[in-house]
Amino acid sequence: MMLYGKKVSKNKAIELQTDYIKDWCTWFRIEISITNRCDHAGVHFWFELMGAYIAFTFYDSRHWNEENNRYEVYDG
């Protein structure tokens, strides 16, 4: 398994993960999602081929506050 994460700005981060699923049952899968106005919103990519996968995420590290319709503000 390989996992890499890095903060690229005050609130943005990237993660890259590769691994192999020993008891795989999915021959092929590709997923791309873009989220907004939720916890850790961003771009998420997953590619899997016969148990080997790579996952990449570029996301906002903050949590979404539904009541105030904005990201949480933490003091300090």
Image: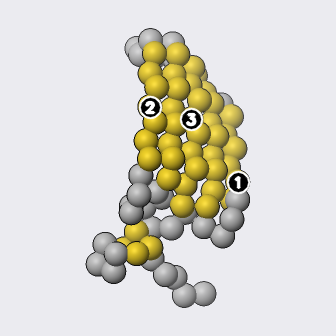
What separation in Å lies between label 2 and label 3 (alpha carbons)? 9 Å
Residue sitting at 51 percent across and 47 percent down? Answer: 43
**Could you tell me how many numbered marks the image carries?**
3
Q: Is residue 22 visible?
A: no
Q: Which residue is mark 3?
A: 55
Residue 10 lies, with reference to residue 33, above or below; the image says: below
Mark 2 is on which residue type? Answer: Glu
Mark 1 is on which residue type? Answer: Lys
Q: Residues within 10 Å of mark 2 (few under 14, many from 20)?
A: few
Kindly identify which numbered label has been placed on residue 6.
1
Answer yes or no: do the residues labelled 1 and 3 have beta carbons within 8 Å? no
Q: Which residue is mark 2?
A: 31
Residue 76 lies, with reference to residue 47, above or below; the image says: below
N-terminal of the two: label 2 or label 1?
A: 1
Instruction: Tell me the quarter of the picture where residue 19 sits.
Output: top right
| Image x and y of residue 3, in percent | 66, 40
**Left or right of 11 on screen, residue 29:** left
| Image x and y of residue 36, in percent | 41, 58
Q: Residues within 10 Å of mark 1 (few under 14, many from 20)?
A: few
Kindly identify which numbered label has been placed on residue 73.
none
Answer yes or no: do the residues labelled 2 and 3 have beta carbons within 8 Å? no
What separation in Å lies between label 1 and label 3 (alpha carbons)? 14 Å
- Dividing the image into 4 quarters, which one contains the C terminus? bottom right
- Dividing the image into 4 quarters, which one contains the N terminus? top right
N-terminal of the two: label 1 or label 3?
A: 1
**Left or right of 76 on screen, residue 7:** right
What kind of element bears circle 2?
strand
Here the colouring is: secondary structure
